[in-house]
Image (cartoon, rainbow, N blue to C red):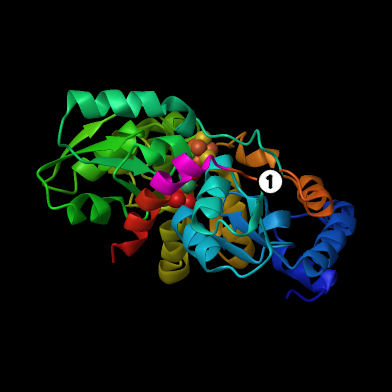
Amino acid sequence: MSVQPNVAQLYDRVKSVILPAEWSLFTPDIEAIHRLKRERNAVILAHNYQTPEIFHGVADIVGDSLALAREAMKSDADVIVLAGVHFMAETAKLLNPSRIVLTPDPAAGCSLAASITAQDVRLLRQRWPGVPIVAYVNTSAAVKAESDICCTSGNARKIVESLGVPKVIMLPDEYLAQNIAKETEVEIIAWAGHCEVHERFTPDDIRRLRLSHPGIVVLAHPECPPDVVAEADFAGSTAAMAEYVTRERPNRVVLMTECSMSDNIAALHPELDFVRPCNLCPHMKRITLPKIRRALETLRHEVTIDPAVAAAARRSVERMLEVR
Ligand code: 13P
Ligand code: SF4
C-alpha cells in the first residue's frame, strides 16, 4: 500500500531536470495519482524511458523490460498500471492474469512489435523447420505465442545459448540479432525489423561527440545498428546502462538511446555531465500523468488477451524467466 508522499521532497529528486514552474503544473496530477493508488490498491510500473515526472514522481517500480516483467509477475496489487508501451502491458497481463492491468494509452505501440505478425512467424517456421524461434519481448502476444522462447535486451545472449543448438531464429530486431551474433558461436537468422528510435544513431554521431567532448564515455542500446555499437564504449539494456553510470561514474557520458533515460539517470547524478543527442520514442511519450490519472480513475484501458493466444505466449515468457 503506497503512502501519500511529500511532493516537495519528490521535487528534490528531479530539480536538476524539471523546472519549478513545470513541477507546479504536474503537482495536482501527482497528488491525485498517489491518492488513487491507495484507493485502488494499485501499483505503477514504469519503463526507464518514461518522463522524469512519471519515473520519479509516481512510479512504484522502474526498470528495463526484463525487470518490469519480473515485477509484474510478483505483484499482489489489484491493479497494475504499466507506464510503458503496449507490449509491456501485455507481458504484465500474461504473467499475472488475475490482476487488472491498465495501459494509460492503448495506442502506445512500438515499431519493432509492428514489424512482424503471427503469420510471419508461422512462415519462418515452415522455411526453417526445427530451428527454434527466439522472440524479443518487443512483440505482440500473438507473435510470442508462435515462438519458442522470449528474450529481452538484458538476457538475449543467455537465452540464445540456453537452447543448446547451433542455429536459432531471432526476431524481429535485425540489429539486436546482429549484435548478439557477434558475441556468440550460435548462428542467428534475423528478421528485418528495426527500432525507429535507435536506427537513427550513426557511427558519425559518436565520432563527432568524441571530437567535441574529449574523454566522453559512450553507452549504446543493442537496438542500435552494429556499427554504432562497435563505436561505443559499452552496450547494454536500459538497466545495464543505468548500472554502468552508477558503477563507473564517468565524468561525462552520452547515452545513445531514448531521451528520458538520460534525464532520469541525470536526476540521480547531478554531479555528472550528461551530453544529450538523444532520440524521442513517440510511443513512450504517449504516456502522460493525466492519462495515468484517468486510467486509475476509470480503470481503463484494461489489457485483455485472447485466452488461446495467452496460454502459448505465457509459455514463451515463462521459459525465458526460468533461464538463470
Ligand atoms: P530495455 O528492455 O533495454 O529496457 O529496452 C526496451 C526498449 O523498448 C528499448 O527501446
Ligand atoms: Fe519500440 Fe524503439 Fe520505442 Fe523501444 S524505443 S518502445 S523499441 S520504438
Which segment did they paint magenta? 305-313
**Does 25 appear above or below 122?**
below
Left or right of 259, for residue 56:
right
Left or right of 103, for residue 132:
left
Please tell me which residue is depicted at 42% across the width and 70% down the height of the picture: 247
Q: Position of residue 283 (x, y in %)?
A: 61, 36
Residue that numbered label 1 is attached to: 302
Please tell me which residue is depicted at 51% across the width and 44% down the height of the picture: 307
Q: Position of residue 24 (x, y in %)?
A: 89, 56
Dividing the picture into quadrants, the one containing residue 321 is bottom left
Q: Nearer the viewer, residue 172 or 279?
A: 172
Dividing the picture into quadrants, the one containing residue 277 is top right
Q: Nearer the viewer, residue 287 or 81?
A: 81
Q: Is residue 308 magenta?
A: yes
The quarter of the image holding the C terminus is bottom left
Q: Position of residue 135 (x, y in %)?
A: 34, 41
The number of numbered discs placed on residues in the rendered structure image is: 1
Label 1: few (<14), some or many (≥20) within 10 Å? many
